[in-house]
């Protein structure tokens, strides 16, 4: 009952293409004709991959400013929405409380 059932591989139906035959080829050994130096020279240090130009700095600062402004506007609007919801709920609670108190006084 709790033993897993391993599915069997279905038999192929239709035209079956045999796998391609590979032929091994031998590569002749290459002998070194020049002696290998004992000390390997170190490569020269390469230049920095990224070069920042003044235009790129202005673009980065402008993009960062735009992101901060948009994010700030979204957060302020969310805070304003929460504040308005809280104020409207408070007003509704006051109205309901005043209606309940006037309804109990007129009995």
Image (cartoon, rainbow, N blue to C red):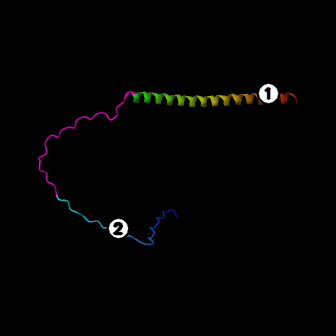
The quarter of the displayed image where residue 90 is located: top right
Work out whether 74 lies above or below 38: above
- For the magenta stretch, what is the residue range? 29-54
The quarter of the displayed image where residue 75 is located: top right
Residue at (38, 70) in percent of width and height = 17
Magenta stretch, overall SS: loop
Residue at (30, 67) in percent of width and height = 21
Q: Nearer the viewer, residue 94 or 48?
A: 48
Residue at (57, 31) in percent of width and height = 74
SS at mark 1 in the image: helix
Q: Which residue is mark 2?
A: 19
SS at mark 2 in the image: loop
Q: Which residue is mark 1?
A: 98
Mark closer to the chain start, 2 or 1: 2
Residue 100 counted in the magenta span: no
Count of marks placed on residues: 2
The percent position of residue 45, horizontal first and vertical second, equals 25, 34
Front position among marks 2 and 1: 2
């Amino acid at each position: 009952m709790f033993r897993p059932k391993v599915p069997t591989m279905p038999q192929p139906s239709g035209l079956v293409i045999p796998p391609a035959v590979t032929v091994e080829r031998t590569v002749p050994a290459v002998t070194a004709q020049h002696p290998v130096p004992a000390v390997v020279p170190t490569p020269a240090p390469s230049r920095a991959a990224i070069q920042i130009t003044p235009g790129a700095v202005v673009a980065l600062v402008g993009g960062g400013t735009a992101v901060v402004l948009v994010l700030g506007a979204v957060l302020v609007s969310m805070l304003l929405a929460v504040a308005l919801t809280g104020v409207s709920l408070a007003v509704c609670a006051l109205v309901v409380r005043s209606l309940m108190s006037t309804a109990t006084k007129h009995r």
